[in-house]
Image (cartoon, rainbow, N blue to C red):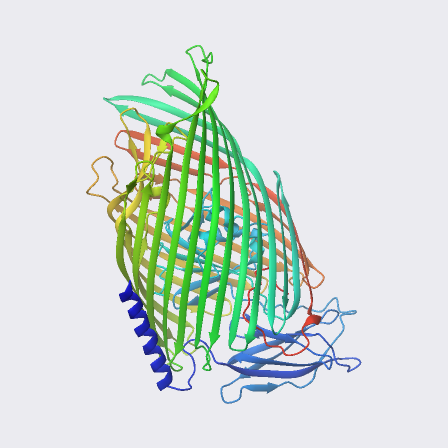
Amino acid sequence: MRYLLLLFTVIVSLNLSAQGGRPGGGEGRERPKIGELSGKIQDSTTNKPVEFATISLFRVKDSSLVTGGVTNAKGEFKITEIPVGMYRVKISFIGYKDKFVGPVFFKPDNPSVTLEPVSISSTEGALDEIEIVAEKADLETKIDRKVFNVEKNITATGGTVNDLLNNIPSVEVDMDGNLSLRGSGNVTVLIDGKPSSMTGGARTAILSSIPASSVESIEVITNPSAKYDPDGMSGIINIVLKKNKLKGITAGVELSAGTGNVYSAAANFNYKNEKINFYTNYSFRHYRGYRNYNSTRNTTVNDTTTTLDQYREGTDLNESHMLKLGLDIFINPKNTLGFFVTGNMARREREGYMKYNEFNNKDLETSFWTRDTYDPTKSRGLDFGLNYQHKFKQPGHDLQLNFNQSIGDNVDNGFYMAQYYDSLLIPEENPERQQLVYDNRNNFFVGMLDYVNPINKKMKIEAGAKATIRNIYQDSYNEYFDYDSSFYVSADSLNNIFKYNEQIYAVYGIWSHTIKERFGYQIGIRLEQALTQPVLVNTNDTYRNDYFSWFPSLHLSYKLGEKKDHELTLSYSKRINRPHMHSLNPFPNYSDPLNVRLGNPYLLPEYIHSIELGYAYYSKYFTFTGSGYFRYMTNMIQRVLVVDSSGVNQRTWSNVDNGFNYGVEAVMIVKPFDWWRMNISFNLYQMVFQDKSNTESDLNNQGLSWSAKLMSTMTFFKKTTEVQINLNYNAPRPVAQGTVRARWNLDFAAKQWFLNRTLGVGIRISDLFNTLRFQIDVEEANQVTYTQFKWETRRFYINLSWKFGNLKQARSRGSYGGGSGGGMDDM
C-alpha cells in the first residue's frame, strides 16, 4: 500500500512542478471562465427598469443552460465567470414575454460584453405570440461517454429512474429493477459521479425511489477512463440529478397516480445566494400489483423423464420514502464546502400461493402439494457526504476532496406453509411451517482525492487517490414449527452468520493532449490493492483473497470535415467484476426447497478487456453515432444450475473458463420537422461462453442477440402539447446454460403545459398491449426447465407538476456557484 501512496505523491509533485513551470495558459477541454456580461432591462412601454428579471445564457452549440443571474432595483445585471464561447441570452420575467438576444461571443482577447438597454413587453394580448424554448440536444458525445438528456422523456412522467433507464439505448431493466448494459448485468451505477449505498445491495429499491423528474441526464460510459472505478464488465451508468443554476428560490411539486393502486409524490425546494446554496427534496412512492410465475421442469434419469409443474399467483407491494438535505457554502470564489445527508426507508411485501404438480413418464400425476408464502422486507439507509473544492488561479485547475459514509439495514422475513395431499387430494395433517429472517447490514466508506491541472490549452494532467472500505454483516435465521411442543424451533443446521470485509486502495494518473484541435488522446493508468475477507461465523471459516490489479485506459479521437462535425474514436480499458457477497456465502437458502440457492466462497474476480471503435456525425436535423465493440473476459463469473441426487436444483456461481462478446451499436436522432423528432437505437451482439474446467455442468454456449428502441416525440400548439411513443424490443439472448426469450413493449404518453410552462398535466400508459414478461429456457445435463414471470405492467397514469419560484432573494451579482439542488424541473 505504501508504494501506491508513494506513486500518487510523485504524480502530484510532477503536476505541481509542471504548473509552476508553465504559468498562464488555458485548460485542456474546459474553456476559461473569463467572460463578463452586463446590461439593463426595461419595460417597453414605460421605459422603467424591470427588477428581478431573469437573465439566462444558453450555449449556441447545444442549447444548454450555462449560467445566469437577475436584475437589481435599477434593472441592471452583471454576470461574471462566463466560459469563452458563443451564447444566446434569454430575458424572462413573470407577466412579460420572453426575449432572446444574441448571439453574444466572449473571446479571450475581448471577454467583456455590455448589451444595449433591452426592452421587454407585457404578455397582455399576446396569446398568439410564438414561444421560443431553448432545448438541450437529446444526445451529446464526449471522448469517453454518451450523455442522454432525458428531461424531454414524458413516457417516464410520474415514474422513476428505472423508467428512464429502460429507454436508454442498450440498457435493459428487468422485472426486479436489475440493470444490464449491452447484454451484461455487470454494470456499475453512480449518482452524480459518486458511489454510495444507493449502488449497493439495496440499489434496486433506492433507484425505484428517485423520481424521473429529478434526473437531468444519464451518462453511459462503456470504456471509462482510469479516473473511475474499474468495476462492471459493461461499464458505468452515471445518473446526473438536476442542479439549480440560478440564484433565488425555486421549488416544485409533482403528484402522480396510476391504476392498480399506484401513486407517488415529490417535492423540492432550493434557495441560493452568493454565500450559500441550500436544497432539499422529498419523494414518496406506493406501488402494488400482481406477480405471477410458472415453470415446467423435465428431468431425465436412466431414460425415464419426470415432470414438475410449478405455478404461483401473488401480489407485490412496494413503498418508499426518500429525503435529502444539503448545503453548499461558497467560502470565497476559490473555495466551496458542501454537506449533504440522504435518508431512505422502503418496505416490500410479497404474498403468493404456489402449486406443485409432479408427473411420471406416462403423464400421470404422482404428487401434489401447495405452498403459501409471505415475504415482508424493510430497509433503511443513511448517506452522509462532505466535499471540498479549491480552484487555483488558472481556470480549470482545481482540487476536490469527497468523503461519503453510507450505513444501511435490510431485513427480509419469510413465512411459509407447505400443504401436502394424498392421492385422493385430501390434505395431510400437520403442514410444514417455516419462518426465515435475513438481517443484512452494511457500512460503506469512500474517500476520494481528485486533482486536475491544465498545463496549457492543449494539455491536461489528472491524478487522484481513493479508499473504499465496505463491511457487510448477514444473519440468516430459520425456524420450523414443532407440533409436539406447539412452538417454532430453531433450525440450527440452516442458520448462519456471514461477514464480508473489503478494502480497496487505488491511485490513478491521466494525461490528455489535443493536437491542432482535431486529434486528441487520453492515456491513463489505475493501480489497485484489494483486501477481502469473507467469514462464515458458524464454522469460523475464513476465505481470504487479496489481490493487486492494474487497469490501463486509452482514448483517441479525431474530428473530420470543415465544420468538424464528423468524429472518429477508439478506446480501450481493462475492467473487473468482483464477486458480490451473495455469490460468496456458501450457506444454502431454502426459501424454495426445490430451488436452493448458495454461493461459492472460492470465486475469483473476473477481468475484462474492452475495445471500442466509434463514429459520430452531427447536424441540425440528423445525428448519428455508431460503434463496434469487443470484450474478452477471463475467470468469467456466471450463475449455474446443478441438480443433486435427490432432484433438487442447486443454483450457485462458478468461474467459467473464459468468454467473449462483440457487437455493433447505432443511435440516430432524426428531426423530419421542427415539431417531430425520433430517437432510434439498435444493438447487435454475439455472446460466447466457454468452460473447459467444469465437469458437472455444461457451461458452453453462444448465440447472437439484438435489441432496438424507438422514441417518437411530437409537439403541437407552440410546443405546449407533447405526445410521445416508446417502443422497445429485445431478441432472444443466450446465457451460460440457456436462452432468455424475446420480449417487447410499447408505452404512450401525452403532456399539456399551462401558465408559461409552469403547470403541466400528463397522462401515460405503460406497456399498452400488455406484452412485457420474462421467459427463460435452461438446459442442464439431464434437465430442461422453462420459466415465465409476469407482473403487472399495463397501467394508466395521470400526473400533475407545478414549478414556481421567487427570485427576489438575489439582488446583487449574477454569477452562480456549483452547488447541487437535485430537485425536479428547474425554473
- Tally of marks: 0
Horizontally, residue 390 falls left or right of residue 52, namely: left
What is the residue that sits farthest to the bottom in this orientation?
A: 109
Spot occupied by residue 236 in the image (x, y as percentages of width and height): 40, 57
The residue shown at (34%, 82%) is 18
Horizontally, residue 22 falls left or right of residue 412, namely: left
Asked if one can make out residue 56 in the rendered structure from this viewpoint, the answer is no
Spot occupied by residue 154 in the image (x, y as percentages of width and height): 58, 54
- Quadrant into which the N terminus falls: bottom left
Residue 587's place in the image compared with 630, above or below, is: above
Q: Quadrant of residue 787?
A: top left
Q: Nearer the viewer, residue 650 or 773?
A: 650
The residue shown at (47%, 37%) is 412
Spot occupied by residue 94 in the image (x, y as percentages of width and height): 73, 69
The residue shown at (53%, 89%) is 110
Q: Nearer the viewer, residue 324 or 50?
A: 324
Q: Nearer the viewer, residue 562 or 192?
A: 192
- Quadrant into which the C terminus falls: bottom right
